[in-house]
Image (cartoon, rainbow, N blue to C red):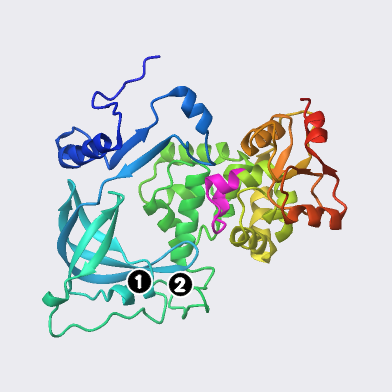
């Protein structure tokens, strides 16, 4: 089929040989012309692979062995805080530049106030750092024996470094936040996230910063009202580049519900979660009306995400933003749904089926146009009951949800 196969692959018959292979490449990894962070180990038998099957995101017949990350010593030159698009304040260690795995590292996130206190990281400290997963720089530990006598503990500032608003930390939360919705740093990060999700090229950091500074843009909907004259007033724009950007803005108006949800920047909603929500609800109107219970019933959506999504759509400012975006011309195309006898139906499974696995049953439901829920609600159309059912059966009976045994389910799906 034309695929390149790695020449360093090996087939081994016992675990000791596999371990020896891992040890060998942990030493030899830097001899390669490309970076690797581990070795993938697979069952070398297609029939056994088929029998083992998959879990939600990975095959049961393969696993990845990650090499221990490389470490290096350096000095913390300063600890600065940054404001994210949700208002979360992130402390970042500015480091004396050091090489790790061929990459120069000059900064490392310290995540939050508690993490700084737990590791007791201070300016002027000597620290050991590593790239977590050989990607993200992090401070592993402080070499306290090298700490200067004049050292003092670091404390989170009381006010936002960007807008001066008092910072807030809610009980039970790790994050300290700026709660000013028009904080320039939050607006900038929200805009960067929005244009990235809708794939609008041409909005670099400097351009967005100029638009904010000149008060031409306060939220993403304002991007769709920019004129050529306004763009030409910005540094770095000529007639052609201004027109090109306007064309890209216009081209972003027809979009999918998936992209639109990602662009909104709802907490805990990335591409995967947005895909689940888009597939289940099909329209932004239906999603805005969803209850926490209905959100939790979607396979893959937990209580934290359900609460976050529901809360987002209850906020007046969120609804106003969506309304302004739609008025500005955003056209959310309805996803093409697979038509079939289960179109528009939500089924929930409980217990084990003798004729197929849970995964096979879910795939069959989806292939026939149906949706699979993870919890029984008033909107559930059928509960499919196998051997040893759980508490879902009792709830379905209480809510008067139609119940199918395995035979009835097989008849419904045409088997």
Q: Within the image, what quadrant is residue 73 found in?
A: bottom left
Q: Position of residue 230 (x, y in %)?
A: 49, 51
| Observer-nearest of 316 and 135 | 135
The answer to whether marks 2 and 1 mark residues whose Cβ atoms lie closer than 8 Å is yes
**Residue 343: mark in rendering:** none
Q: Position of residue 29 (x, y in %)?
A: 19, 38
| Observer-nearest of 338 and 25 | 25
Decide: few, some or many residues near mark 2? Use Cα within 10 Å; few <14, some 14-19, many ≥20: some
Q: Quadrant of the N terminus?
A: top left
Q: Is residue 251 above or below residue 98?
A: above
| Observer-nearest of 105 and 189 | 105
Q: Within the image, what quadrant is residue 309 found in?
A: bottom right
**Residue 115: mark in rendering:** 1
Q: Within the image, what quadrant is residue 8 found in?
A: top left
Residue at 34% over, 35% down = 41
Q: CA distance from mark 2 to mark 1?
A: 9 Å
Q: In the displayed image of the protein, which residue is found farthest to the top?
A: 1
Magenta segment boundaries in residue numbering: 262-275
Q: Position of residue 260 (x, y in %)?
A: 60, 46
Asked if residue 8 lies in the magenta stretch, the reply is no
In this image, 185 relative to 319: left or right?
A: left
| Observer-nearest of 16 and 85 | 16
Q: Which numbered disc flags the more N-terminal residue, 2 or 1?
A: 1
Q: Secondary structure at mark 2?
A: loop
Q: Is residue 144 above or below residue 247?
A: below
């Amino acid at each position: 089929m034309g695929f390149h196969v790695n020449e360093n692959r090996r087939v081994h018959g016992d675990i000791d040989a596999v371990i020896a292979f891992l040890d060998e490449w942990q030493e030899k990894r830097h001899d390669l012309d490309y970076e690797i962070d581990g070795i993938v180990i697979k069952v070398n038998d297609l029939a056994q692979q088929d029998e083992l099957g998959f879990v939600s995101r990975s095959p049961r017949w393969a696993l990845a062995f990650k090499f221990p990350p490389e470490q290096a010593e350096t000095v913390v030159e300063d600890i600065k805080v940054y404001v994210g698009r949700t208002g979360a304040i992130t402390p970042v260690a500015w480091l004396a530049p050091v090489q790790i795995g061929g990459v120069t590292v000059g900064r490392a996130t310290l995540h939050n106030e508690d993490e700084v206190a737990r590791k007791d990281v201070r300016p002027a400290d000597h620290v050991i750092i590593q790239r977590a997963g050989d990607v993200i720089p992090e401070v592993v530990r402080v070499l306290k024996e090298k700490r200067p006598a004049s050292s003092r503990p670091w404390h989170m500032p009381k006010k936002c470094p960007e807008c001066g608003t008092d910072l807030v930390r809610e009980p039970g939360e790790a994050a300290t936040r700026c709660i000013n919705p028009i904080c320039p740093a939050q607006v900038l990060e929200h805009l960067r996230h929005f244009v990235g999700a809708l794939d609008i090229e041409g909005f670099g950091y400097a351009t967005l910063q100029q638009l904010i500074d000149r008060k031409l843009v306060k939220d993403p909907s304002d991007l769709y009202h920019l004129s050529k004259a306004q763009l030409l007033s910005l540094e770095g724009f000529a007639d052609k580049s201004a027109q090109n950007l306007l064309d890209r803005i216009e081209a972003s108006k027809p979009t999918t519900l998936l992209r639109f949800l990602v662009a909104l920047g709802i907490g805990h909603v990335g591409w995967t979660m947005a895909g689940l929500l888009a597939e289940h609800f099909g329209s932004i109107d239906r999603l805005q009306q969803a209850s926490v219970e209905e959100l939790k019933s979607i396979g893959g959506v937990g209580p934290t995400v359900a609460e976050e999504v529901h809360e987002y759509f209850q906020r007046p400012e969120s609804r106003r933003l969506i309304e302004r975006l739609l008025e500005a011309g955003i056209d959310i195309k309805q996803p093409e749904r697979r038509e079939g006898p289960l179109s528009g139906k939500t089924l929930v499974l409980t217990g084990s089926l003798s004729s197929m696995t849970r995964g096979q049953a879910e795939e069959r439901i989806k292939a026939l146009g149906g949706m699979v829920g993870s919890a029984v609600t008033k909107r559930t159309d059928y509960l499919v009951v196998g051997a040893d059912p759980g508490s879902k059966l009792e709830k379905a009976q209480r809510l008067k949800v139609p119940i199918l045994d395995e035979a009835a389910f097989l008849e419904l799906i045409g088997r």
